[in-house]
Amino acid sequence: MMLLSESLKSKVTTKLQLDCPEKLHGSPEKQLDELFDFVIERYNHERLEQRQMAASKEEMMTNISHDLRTPLTAIIGYLGLVVTPTTVMREGDQQKYLETAYHKANQMKMLVEDLFEFAKLQSSQITLNVTDFSLGDLFEQVLANYAVEAEKRGIRLTTQLAPDFIVMAGDSEKLARVLINLVENALKYGQDASFIKITGQEKANNQVEIRVVNDGPAIPQEALTQLFNRFYRVESSRNTGTGGTGLGLSIVKGVIDKHHGSVRAESSEELTSFIITLPKKQEKEE
């Protein structure tokens, strides 16, 4: 067993008294034993977190590779049929193949944009273009992108503000990306939902609360606290019908963090809500 000098014991004990006073009990020798136990426990906990993060990162890279390879394979296949001189196609097949390849190319573009945005957020290279904007106008602009799709699926898109007119400061382009990601998330995973609603409400201390709500299937309770973590993706949501990198909610959290706000999710059998709290005013970045 390693022997420590009295001076080192004193320094270690003093450090523990300052950082973790609740860990100290009994004689100096017992306190030192408790310190070693505490340090070992913390070390093991950090190692476990690192291993879990590495495993999650590896899984995410595997998922991204799959998500990129799948549309790329389809694009090559359909374009190969079109450009091969010996291919015999029925009337309308060429147009159908080109439209499918175009759709798959756009899907890849969205995946790459998600990766690029995520990489910028993680490297702190992103800056905010802070301006004053109308929250209601932002809501309407975002939902206008999904009017046709929502109508086809029988989903009502609505907004609500309290008060009726809210002006706040922030990077409206990046906050629009946040709302787009949350609406797309509701459309992808909110099967059988009848509505998607975006609300804004002024709160105390110059805060604004934004909610994106739908009545689709509930998110498992054990997943709610991890949804915004890097590399996390609810396993049950991975299927060929949804697509995406699984980075959308990480991007949401990154943008909201840059605005000095917070985001969380609540879900029950009746409603699923993504709740954003933002300061009404923002300092402009130099």
Image (spheres, helix red, strand yellow):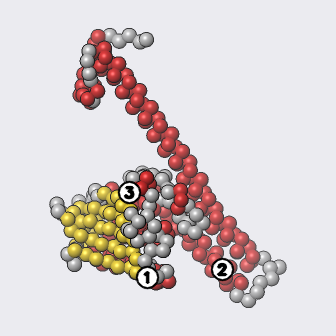
Residue 260 visible at all? yes
Q: In the image, what residue type sits under mark 2?
A: Leu
Q: Secondary structure at mark 2?
A: helix
**What residue would you read off at disc 2?**
98
Q: Are marks 2 and 3 in contact (CB under 8 Å)?
A: no
Mark nearer the N terminus (3 vs 1): 1
Q: Looking at the image, which residue sits at the far right?
A: 86
Height in image: 79 above or below 95? above
> In the picture, which quadrant includes the C terminus?
bottom left
Q: Nearer the viewer, residue 274 or 91?
A: 274
**What residue would you read off at disc 1?**
147
**What residue would you read off at disc 3?**
254
Q: Residues within 10 Å of mark 2 (few under 14, many from 20)?
A: some
> In the picture, which quadrant includes the N terminus?
top left
Q: Residue at x 28, y 73 (%)?
A: 135
Q: Secondary structure at mark 3?
A: helix
Q: In the image, what residue type sits under mark 1?
A: Ala
Q: Residue at x 43, y 77 (%)?
A: 194
Q: Are marks 3 and 1 in contact (CB under 8 Å)?
A: no
Mark nearer the N terminus (2 vs 3): 2
Which of labels 1 and 2 is toward the front?
A: 1
